[in-house]
Amino acid sequence: MITELNKRSEAILRYIVDSYLETGTPVGSKLIASGLHNTISSATIRNVMSELERSGLLYAPHTSAGRLPTERGLRFYVDGLMQIGDLNESEQLHIESQCHSAGYSPTHIMEQATSMLSGLSSAASIIVAPKTEKPVKQIQFVKLSDTRVLVILVTEDGMVENRVMEHEEHIPESALIEASNYLNAKLNGKTITDTKRHIDSEISNKRVQLDTITADLVQRGIAIGANRPSEGHIIIKGQSNLLNDVKALEDLERARQLMAALEEQEAIAKLLQSTENADGVQIYIGTENQMFDHSGWSMVITPYKNKEKTIVGAVGVIGPTRLNYSRIIPLIDYTSKVMEKILS
């Protein structure tokens, strides 16, 4: 991958990409010369365009003598040439008011934020909503045999879940009673995740006196609860915007496939996985986007966190590769920060 260009090549590539993002049409040397105020001759521009094409940053559609950026060219532009503007105070206030205007229900807030992003970006917007975890009322250990234990978990709303746990050693009844009492004293209406973090810290730092078997029962029992399925959900708005750039039958089919993929719940895990180690906004261009296995689309996405600074969801925009990246990046970034404030 090319890491640097000279100033002239940068200026020409930037002009071609900017024009492509605005119009979606190939760009010829005469238009570039005019756009650059005739500071570079058309002949020189054509030579530079040929060099950029050989470098894999541009390509020439068979229907035109002009050039378009490749996915590689777009990536070069996004990483090194694009200028990202800041949102002004009016735009920030608009995002805040739109997110707040739905009231205090987290679901309504996310619905409103998704609609707002779709309207401002002219693309499809997505929010991966956080998983919901119900407070746990009680955990009980019941002996099935010398080495097998039934773990019974009861949530505050009365749901009961059972899991069987195997142990290598003989389990005395006293260890089951002590483990149950210790866990239930710590739970006290809290979620498993919150309780597990506290218990793991207590045991690892030896702030609680439990024998080896009891400590093992406690940690494995709470881990079983923490691994319970807890579905998040994905909110999508503006799918019709994906059809705005459709110019051929194959484009329509790709748009249909993408919209179908967006409706599948397994997309949630893939979307969140893409942000787990993210530092700010992530951009996936074309075939870099393995979330949906379709080329021709781009995704701009950023995670948002809860009050414990744990990633619980993501905010993003999906559209054709000619997304207005410099506009969308600050929109998504600011929206995620507003949501973190509201939902914490």
Image (cartoon, helix red, strand yellow):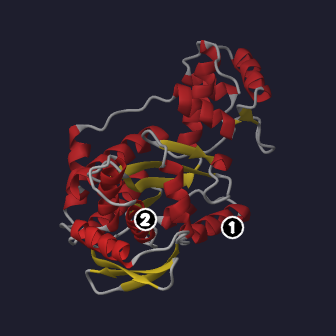
Quadrant in the picture for the N terminus: top right
Q: Of the residues tagged 1 and 2, which is closer to the observer? A: 2
Q: Disc 1 marks which amino acid? A: Glu
Looking at the image, is 279 positioned above or below residue 148? above
Q: Nearer the viewer, residue 186 or 44?
A: 186
**In the rendering, which numbered label is found on residue 213?**
2
The image quarter in which residue 281 lies:
top left
At numbered mark 1, what does the secondary structure look like: helix, strand or loop?
helix
Q: Nearer the viewer, residue 263 or 60?
A: 263
Distance between the alpha carbons at the discs numbered 1 and 2: 58 Å
Residue plotted at (50% across, 64% down): 268
Looking at the image, is 32 positioned above or below residue 104? above
Residue 244 appears left or right of 159: right
**In the rendering, which numbered label is found on residue 253?**
1
Residue plotted at (45% across, 37% down): 326
Q: Disc 2 marks which amino acid? A: Ile
Looking at the image, is 92 positioned above or below residue 79? below
Residue 167 appears left or right of 252: left
Give the x, y percent position of residue 119. 38, 58
Residue 222 visible? The answer is: yes
At numbered mark 2, what does the secondary structure look like: helix, strand or loop?
helix
Give the x, y percent position of residue 58. 72, 33
Residue plotted at (20% across, 59% down): 100
Residue 250 appears left or right of 85: right
The image quarter in which residue 131 lies:
bottom left
Give the x, y percent position of residue 115. 35, 63
